[in-house]
Image: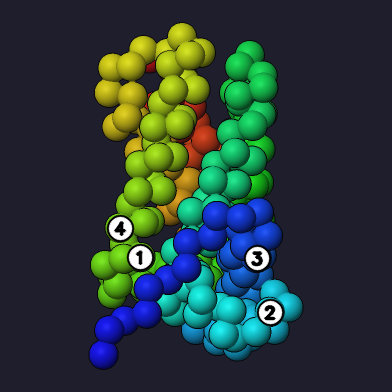
Amino acid sequence: MEKKELYTPKQKRSIETKNKIIAAGGELMLMKGYHNITTDDIAKYAGVSTGIIYHYFKNKKDILLCALEQHAFQITEESMSELINNPNIDKDAYLNYVFDYFIKYHEENWTIHEELEVLYHMDEDVAKILDKLWIETNKTLFNILKNMGLSSNNLHERITLSLNLIEDFCHTYMCDAYAYLDWEYMRKQTIDMIKHLLFEE
């Protein structure tokens, strides 16, 4: 039996319907987690029939991949907007803004974040798109910092180290087992390391 070919929307209304499904799927996954919802749930939340879902998408994972691309772009834009709009911003103020942003993001989306960590190691398609998004984030920040006059010498590597420091801090912060740690001290030390990596050549 031949697989049904997915419909590629070209008209405005069809494009809007597909985007509505992606947005609904993304919101539900953020609220409840990937494994806790079904395509029926997404259809109901989007206000469409389940048949319409399969008109545009192969399965729930297909919606996840599309939602990841859109959502990741939004995260990159929001977290870097202060630096883009004000290249002379106080570096400590900016890095504290970034920390607040990502701590809040992890607190609000911890379930799906943990699921994506697992899916990254189990699903090749998810791994490919997460790697792609990570690389695009690195390239975007590279161009921003280069336009600010920073040397491009090992800049990709410095950015990668900095992003990993933020991510590791957030993961540790979210783990109850580490509640005994002095978070203000760790935050300050991490910010100092990132500031040195990115801005103090």
Residue 136: x, y in percent? 40, 40
* The image quarter in which residue 91 lies: top right
> Label 2 near label 3: C-beta < 8 Å?
yes
Upstream in the sequence, badge 1 or badge 3? 3
Mark whose residue sits in front, 2 or 4 = 2
* Quadrant location, the C terminus: top left
Q: Which residue in the structure is indicated by mark 2?
A: 48
Residue 190: x, y in percent? 48, 40
Residue visible at 61% across and 25% down? 83
Amino acid type at image mark 4: Lys
Query: Badge 1: few (under 14), some or many (20 or more) residues near its Cα, within 10 Å?
Result: many
Mark whose residue sits in front, 2 or 1 = 2
Above or below 111: residue 90 = above
Q: CA distance from mark 1 to mark 3?
A: 24 Å
Taking the image as shown, residue 154 lies to the left or right of residue 185, namely left
Q: Which residue in the structure is indicated by mark 3?
A: 17
Q: CA distance from mark 2 to mark 1?
A: 26 Å
Q: Which residue in the structure is indicated by mark 4?
A: 128
Amino acid type at image mark 3: Thr
Residue 52: x, y in percent? 59, 79
